[in-house]
């Protein structure tokens, strides 16, 4: 995607490009260095210079060769571009911008650094630099901006999604045509009955009976077609809705953690359940009737023209006004229902948070507080719903009245024509019936904009997920092989956001079977490092090698199958102990499960539960203690026989007995396996082959427990601090 904004000629005239110099990046910014909003301000990076134009004046210009660093920093509701000049070696703020432009300036900073380092890598292909050239919105992956692409593109995607239902669509459409033809035939028989039987003076009982039988047949056929239309439309809507839910769920499963963590659970649940339900509702209520209403309306107009062209034109004279109002208010309706969907997300998320954290709520006695908080969120959602319904309750009758004016004029003028003999009474009643058939579909169609807007809003939200491309995916020719456990970090750099570095120039090597302890203060990047090893994220720069092969070249499924993970916050599914253990290896035998449980010191306590291995553990395993949950997690990891083991604070927040049992289980688990371990208690890592101390986003120290203590550096300070804390606890 093109990152550069085309510079106006007045900006280009401020500086002269040199020989072989070209603009690599250019982005506008909207805040000057005094914190005021500004126009005609740009950050420009060429292959030789950084140029900052503020209010049509060059306020900063420097050769890249004279700079030692360039970075983008996030501040409160804004970002800044900071450069470090070689001669002064001090950081200097050269541009300020709003958050919507921070991704572009992160690209400028990254591009500047790469050119300063002489790297040949281009940054145009990096995922975090994807932004919409029209609105500046950050676009992860290769997505198209849903805000700028247009509704027709969204609808075409939906049409492709429905391609498997062509036969069902055809069934519903043909049934609608048949139903319309039946209803259009009724007034014709009524007109002939009135004029030829009742008013001609030649009517008889058989003619009346024949008319009653004809109308009865028409009524029965109408009921049957209505039933089949509803049945087939419901099947069609349910099938499409099911496909959407499955596609959304599958897409969420394969997307990276960054996408999931940037969205609230209630929002994603809304898109899977409510938005797919809106599509089903549209297919049942709107599509199931749209062909019927259109054919009925067109058929009524054709018959009306054959009866009286003048009356027909009079009956439709108000339609352009009604149509103009519908089109004019379309954006207002869309904005209202889009906001209603967003507040629905807030409502669901608030509910999900409280239910998930009900123990915390009750522990702090905050039931009333949470009730009031949810009431406020729910009240906001209810107010928007009420306002939307009030708006529609006022808008719809206005349209109905405008279109109803045609029937009033038709009835009046048609009555005069019947009095002077230019229309028979049967023709007048027939014309009014068809006029009603005309305005019935038109009245229904006044609801159509609302239904379409709701569907489009839901489709946009659905495709916001479906169009998201996973940042981590299999290579074109992925490698499937058993790993040994050699791990190498080569100049690895990573940040969850392009302008916030978490790990910088990480270099170290782990041999097969080694246990490596990772220590450091909170927020230094310990968990991030193991997330990279688990391939939950891709490195931004450098290489991460497993057995000498880039981690990106492995088939994801095969690689993750060979990793065992035991985390601090153990998650168990709302299922039995047996099924929670089998999650790592679905085809595991009972013998393998029991052996893994014994190795994890979990078999004895499992046998004491009411139903043994078939005991239900409850929501997130809360029917078990923390130590019991942790031992089941270890058994789950053992069952998979991993080649690479990740331990993230696996023994924190446990009592002494539980920690002892878990430490014994972990010793069996780590034997002969490459292990990366993070531990709160540094004493648990003293037997590790090596310890890596992370500080300032880099590896500050590396060595054995004794070697690091002798250095009296960061690790020594951490151990000393923990010993002092332990002494204070014992004295207390």
Image (cartoon, grey):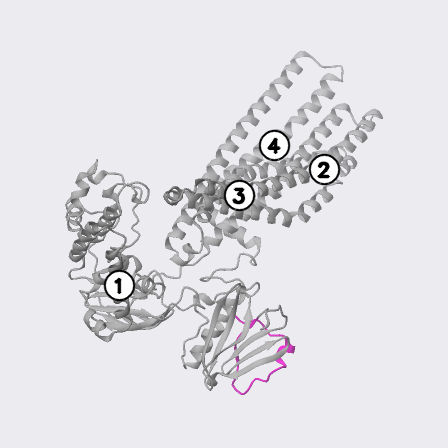
The magenta-colored residue range is: 1-28
Image mark for residue 403: 2
The residue that disc 3 covers is 376
Badge 1 element: helix
- The C terminus sits in image quarter: bottom left
Is residue 564 visible from the viewing direction of this image?
no
The residue that disc 4 covers is 181
Viewer-closest of 446 and 527: 527
Mark-to-mark CA distance, 1 and 4 = 90 Å
In the picture, measured across the screen, residue 645 lies left or right of residue 432, that is left
Viewer-closest of 186 and 153: 153
Mark 1 surroundings: few (<14), some (14-19) or many (≥20) residues within 10 A? few
> Mark 4 or mark 3, which is nearer to you?
3
Give the answer, above or below, for where 425 lies relative to 448: above
For the residues bearing labels 4 and 3, Cβ distance under 8 angstroms = no
In the picture, measured across the screen, residue 432 lies left or right of residue 110, that is right
Q: Residue at x 66, y 16 (%)?
A: 207
Mark with earlier residue (1, 4): 4
Residue 13 in the image, given as x and y percentages of width and height: 63, 81
């Amino acid at each position: 995607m093109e990152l550069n904004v085309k510079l106006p000629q007045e900006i280009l005239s401020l500086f002269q490009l040199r020989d072989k110099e070209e603009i690599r990046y250019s982005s506008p910014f909207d805040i000057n260095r005094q914190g005021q909003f500004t126009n005609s301000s740009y950050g420009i990076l060429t292959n030789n210079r950084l140029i900052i134009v503020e209010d049509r004046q060059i306020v900063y210009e420097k050769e890249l060769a004279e700079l030692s660093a360039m970075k983008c920093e996030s501040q409160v509701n804004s970002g800044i571009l900071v450069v470090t000049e070689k001669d002064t070696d001090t950081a200097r703020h050269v541009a300020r911008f709003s958050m919507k432009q921070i991704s572009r300036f992160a690209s400028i900073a990254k591009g500047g650094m790469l050119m300063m380092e002489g790297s040949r890598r281009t940054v145009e292909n990096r995922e975090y630099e994807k932004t919409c050239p029209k609105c500046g919105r950050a676009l992860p992956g290769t997505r198209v901006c849903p805000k700028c692409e247009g509704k027709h593109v969204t609808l075409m995607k939906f049409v492709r999604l429905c391609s498997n239902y062509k036969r069902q669509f055809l069934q519903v459409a043909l049934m609608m045509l048949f139903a319309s033809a039946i209803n259009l035939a009724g007034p014709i028989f009524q007109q002939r009955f009135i004029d030829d039987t009742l008013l001609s003076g030649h009517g008889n009982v058989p003619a009346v009976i024949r008319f009653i039988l004809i109308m009865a047949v028409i009524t029965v056929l109408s009921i049957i077609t209505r039933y089949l239309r509803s049945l087939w439309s419901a099947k069609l809507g349910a099938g499409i809705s099911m496909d959407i839910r499955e596609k959304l769920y599958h897409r969420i499963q394969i997307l990276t953690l960054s996408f999931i963590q940037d969205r609230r659970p209630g929002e994603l649940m809304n898109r899977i359940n409510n938005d797919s339900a809106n599509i089903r509702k549209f297919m049942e209520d709107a599509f199931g009737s749209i062909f019927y209403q259109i054919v009925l309306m067109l058929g009524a107009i054709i018959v009306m023209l054959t009866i009286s062209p003048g009356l027909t034109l009079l009956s439709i004279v108000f339609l352009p006004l009604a149509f103009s109002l519908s089109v004019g208010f379309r954006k207002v309706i869309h904005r209202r229902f889009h906001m209603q969907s967003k507040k629905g997300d807030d409502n669901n998320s608030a509910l999900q948070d409280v239910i998930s954290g009900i123990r915390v709520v009750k522990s702090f006695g905050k039931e009333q507080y949470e009730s009031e908080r949810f009431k406020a969120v729910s009240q906001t959602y209810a107010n928007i719903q009420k306002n939307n319904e009030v708006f529609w309750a006022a808008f719809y009758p206005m349209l109905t009245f405008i279109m109803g004016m045609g029937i009033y004029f038709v009835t009046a003028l048609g009555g005069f024509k019947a009095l002077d003999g230019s229309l028979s009474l049967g023709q007048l009643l027939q014309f009014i019936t068809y006029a009603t058939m005309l305005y019935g579909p038109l009245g229904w169609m006044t609801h159509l904009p609302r239904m379409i807007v709701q569907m489009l809003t839901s489709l946009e939200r659905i495709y916001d997920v479906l169009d998201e491309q996973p940042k981590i995916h299999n290579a074109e020719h992925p490698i499937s092989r058993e790993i040994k456990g050699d791990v190498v970090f080569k100049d690895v750099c990573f940040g969850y956001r392009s302008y916030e570095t978490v790990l910088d120039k990480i270099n170290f090597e782990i041999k097969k079977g080694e246990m490596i302890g990772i220590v450091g203060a909170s927020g230094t990047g310990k968990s991030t490092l193991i997330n990279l090893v688990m391939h939950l994220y891709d490195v931004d720069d450098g290489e991460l090698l497993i057995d000498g092969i880039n981690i990106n070249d492995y088939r994801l499924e095969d690689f993750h199958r060979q990793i065992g993970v035991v985390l601090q916050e153990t998650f168990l599914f709302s299922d039995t102990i047996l099924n929670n253990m089998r999650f790592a290896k679905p085809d595991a035998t009972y013998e393998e499960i029991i052996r893994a449980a014994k190795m994890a010191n979990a078999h004895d306590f499992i046998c004491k539960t009411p139903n043994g291995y078939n005991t239900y553990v409850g929501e997130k395993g809360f029917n078990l203690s923390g130590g019991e949950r942790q031992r089941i997690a270890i058994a789950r990891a053992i069952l998979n026989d991993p080649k690479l083991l990740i331990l993230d604070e696996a023994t924190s927040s446990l009592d002494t007995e539980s920690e002892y049992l878990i430490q014994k289980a972990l010793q069996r688990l780590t034997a002969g396996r490459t292990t990366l371990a993070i531990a709160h208690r540094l004493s648990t890592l003293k037997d590790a082959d090596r310890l890596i101390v992370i500080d300032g986003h880099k590896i500050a120290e590396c060595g054995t427990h004794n070697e690091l203590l002798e250095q009296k550096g960061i690790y020594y300070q951490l151990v000393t601090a923990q010993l002092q804390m332990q002494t204070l606890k014992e004295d207390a």
